[in-house]
Amino acid sequence: MIVRKVVSLTGVANVVVVTLGLIALSLMRGPASPPRGGVPHTEAQKKPEQSQQAPPQPVLPGFALPAPVEATEESAREAKANEVGLVPVLMYHRIRWDRSASIDRTPKQLRVELERLARAGYVPVTAAEFVEGRMDVAAGAHPVVLTFDDGNPSHFALGDDGVPMKDTAVQIILAVAEKYPSFRPVATFYVNREPFGLKGRDAQKAGVRWLMDHGFEVANHTYAHKDLRSLSNKKVSEQIVRGERLLRQLGVEDFSTFALPFGSRPRKGSLGRGGSWDGDKYRYEGVFLAGAEPSKSPFAKGYDARQIQRIQSNGLAGDCRKWCSTYWLKWLDDHPEQRYTADGDPDTLSLPRQLRANVASKRGKKVIYY
């Protein structure tokens, strides 16, 4: 298969393209430049309460999945359904106009990439929906997973009016969804000990609640963003459990997915997916790496929930000419038969008859071959 030849050097690409950028970014940790148009809500919270009533909140684009249809062999063929195809899981870090690390993206670059996805028929699903096989987008559409690492203030900040601030990731996602109604405004945010730069548990809890109420997933990226491969087994589990404990305090209840800091697996690989520390256990449906190819469908052979591939959002410079989002999205456009295309029915799994040997897990679904 074409894709096997293309991705044979994935391990090298992970090291060259992603790890160096992540290490450089970790050395720059600190306050991010605020989004244009004002200060983040961490500053806004310092202002005295106003006596006047708050203005009415604008109506934001909905995030509900489309009404299901009942797939048939004929409808699956018409949609060109292939639910064992490849799914792009895109990985973003800081969103800022003054890019100071190779893996930073500007607000314009994020907006352009999301609009490209929308025009190509991609519909966002959360990482949890992906690993649980709930990519119930419309017939003929393609799921995409948008993931943002480190819980940076450039991902999410509310203004005084209670809506996402201009040029934050959430505001851009919502704006694209308003322009392209079929583009579902959801994403997954992998956070550490200070989500989105918010100070204090009450502010953090309010921010996380806002995101979850609007369809976004907030998930574990460890407590202190340490390279798990450099830690003892006990310290690995401690980092993961402490991250979960924080999220539970902030109101998160669904712990389906986990993203490895730096994409670095523990020396005891199984600890990335399950373990225990200080009396608390953890277990994930899916663990995400940091690059550098589309993921296998969770229904397909070769899918490994312990190490799910992601694609770094970036252009074509340097090693990214073959391993980042600009390259891969064009590759999927040029090879549509390799891409996951939905049949629109949550209860069925549809694919061309010649791909029947690629099915590894039906997950209780009725299979339609055409």
Image (cartoon, grey):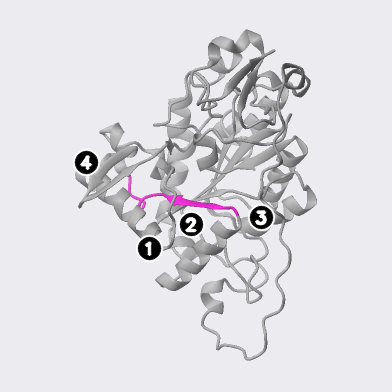
Disc sitting over residue 107 in the figure: 3
Q: Secondary structure at mark 2?
A: loop
Residue 155 appears in the picture as rendered: no
Q: Residue at x 74, y 45 (%)?
A: 115
Q: Is residue 205 above or below residue 5?
A: below
**Residue 169 image offset from top left, x and y in percent:** 62, 55
Question: Mark 4 = which residue?
Answer: 233
Q: Nearer the viewer, residue 136 or 224?
A: 136
**Image depth: mark 1 or mark 3 in front:** 1
Residues at marks 2 and 3 touching, judged by CB atoms closer than 8 Å: no
Label 3: element kind: helix
N-term mark: 4 or 2: 2
Q: Is 203 covered by the magenta stretch? A: no
Please state which of the two labelled residues, at mark 2 or mark 3, is closer to the viewer: 2
At label 1, the amino acid type is Gln
Q: Earlier in the sequence, mark 4 or mark 1?
A: 4
Q: Is residue 301 visible?
A: yes
Q: Residues within 10 Å of mark 1 (few under 14, many from 20)?
A: few
How far apart are labels 4 and 1 at the CA level?
25 Å
Give the residue pinned by disc 1: 249
**Which of the marked residues, 2 or 3, is nearer the chain's N terminus?**
3
Disc 2 designates what residue?
A: 151
